[in-house]
Image (spheres, grey):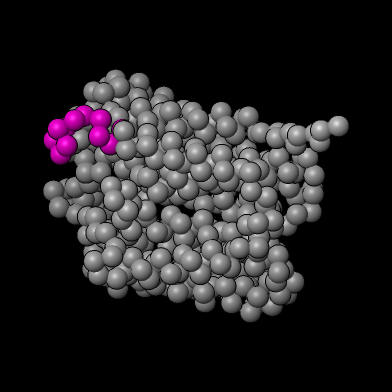
Amino acid sequence: MAPKRKIFLYDYWLLLIVFALLAIGLLMVASASMVISDRQYHTPFHFLFHQLAYMGVGIFLGFIVIRIPLVFWEKIGSYLLLFSLFLLVLVLIPNVGREVNGSIRWLGFGPFGIQVSELTKFCIVIYMAGYLVRHQREVQNSFSGFLKPMILLAIVAVLLLLEPDFGAVAVIMLTILGMIFLAGARLWQFTLLLILVASALVLVAIASPYRLVRLTTFLHPWVNQFNSGYQLTQSLIAFGRGGIFGVGLGNSIQKLFYLPEAHTDFLFAVLAEELGLVGQLVVLGLFVALISRILFIARIVNKTGRFFVMYMTYGFALWLSLQTMINIGVNVGILPTKGLTLPFMSYGGSSLLFNCIVIAILLRIYNESLTS
């Protein structure tokens, strides 16, 4: 008798939410980038085709990753972190890292490139999940338990700030702090560490003139609306023009070279202008549903007692939710401008690739939790 084939039970709700976000993202990338694409490449769909290519690669990698047992990620967590550190150093070497808009964050491979900070977020979540399992008692009972990984993460933060990529540092630090809190760190120790990390981030921000300008400009963008506040004021104009129902898909004025990075960091502003408050609420609802579904999977895992998988799931939820909140917060002017994409939607190959890989791992987690 032939052996029975293992049945994969997919979380179809998670898949439906993700494909909805991907579809809306493609639609908005096409709309927001048509003018700039035509000007730079003499074709209106250059950025759309690139995004489709990365999505295809991401889905292909997802089909591979979903076949990998979760124990594999637990075994290679430390190696992944070392690999990401190597790439963070490599990207800073002259003539190796690729510079875009004054930041050296990419390693180029022909027409394609990978943003190392996106890989670093992925690797650190997996490493920290393993660390919290191996040192759970130490994390819960002593200050050194969660001070040790912060020393290593400080090295990562320094390398990221040299690129510079302050946004990635903020997401990584907040994600790791959240994971440590969920692991049962004492409240006073966690609060002390949170104050130390927040103080360090503030010192780093004010130590660099351009970062200080960004931090102060978002509070009063109209004071310097044609200088440091230009990008934010143009984003706010997009929200104002959109109203409740928007000006219609493809009818944005701000994407006509008024709003910089309209198809990347400020895609949500173009969406707000074209689809209005209704479109914004739909997208926000999808992200709330996405994070809720990931937390639901974490609850299922918690019942199985697989702590590494549980911490990893919570880590992915924190990463995606923080990056979403920061990106939208920047677009609406309640946070300083940061170079962070909107997960699954903004133009950006590296972000899309690792978003797809994360979803594939979550589907594997759901499967193993129900079939184990």
Q: Is residue 102 left or right of residue 303?
A: left
The prevailing secondary structure element of the residues shown in magenta is: helix
Residue range of the region highlighted in magenta in the rendering: 38-48
Q: Indicate left or right for 17 with 160 as reference.
A: right
Can residue 25 be seen at all in this image of the molecule?
yes
Q: For residue 95, what is the image quadrant?
A: bottom left
Instruction: Measuring from the top left, give residue 284's x and y in whole percent.
Output: 47, 34
Relative vertical location of residue 128 with respect to residue 316 in this rendering, above or below? below
Residue pictured at 76% horizontal, 34% vertical: 5
Relative depth, front residue between 339 and 6: 6
Q: Quadrant of the C terminus?
A: top right
Closer-to-camera residue (55/31): 55
Q: Is residue 181 visible?
A: no
Which residue is the extreme one toward the right? 1
Residue plotted at (15% across, 39% down):
40
Return the x and y of residue 208 as percentages of the image width and height.
27, 70
Is residue 6 in the magenta section?
A: no
Quick one: 354 or 193, which is closer to the camera? Answer: 354
Kindly indicate the quadrant of the structure image that contains residue 101.
bottom left
* Residue shown at 30% from the left, 22% from the top: 249
Closer to the camera in the image, 187 or 154: 154
Residue 244 in the image: above or below residue 323: above
Horizontally, residue 51 falls left or right of residue 238, namely: right
Quadrant of the rendered image containing residue 1 = top right
Q: Residue at x 43, y 36 (%)?
A: 56
Vertical relation: 363 (above or below) 20? below
Q: Is residue 166 left or right of residue 259?
A: right
Residue 40 lies within the magenta run: yes
Furthest residue in direction front, as rendered: 1
Residue 112's x, y, as percent?
Answer: 32, 48
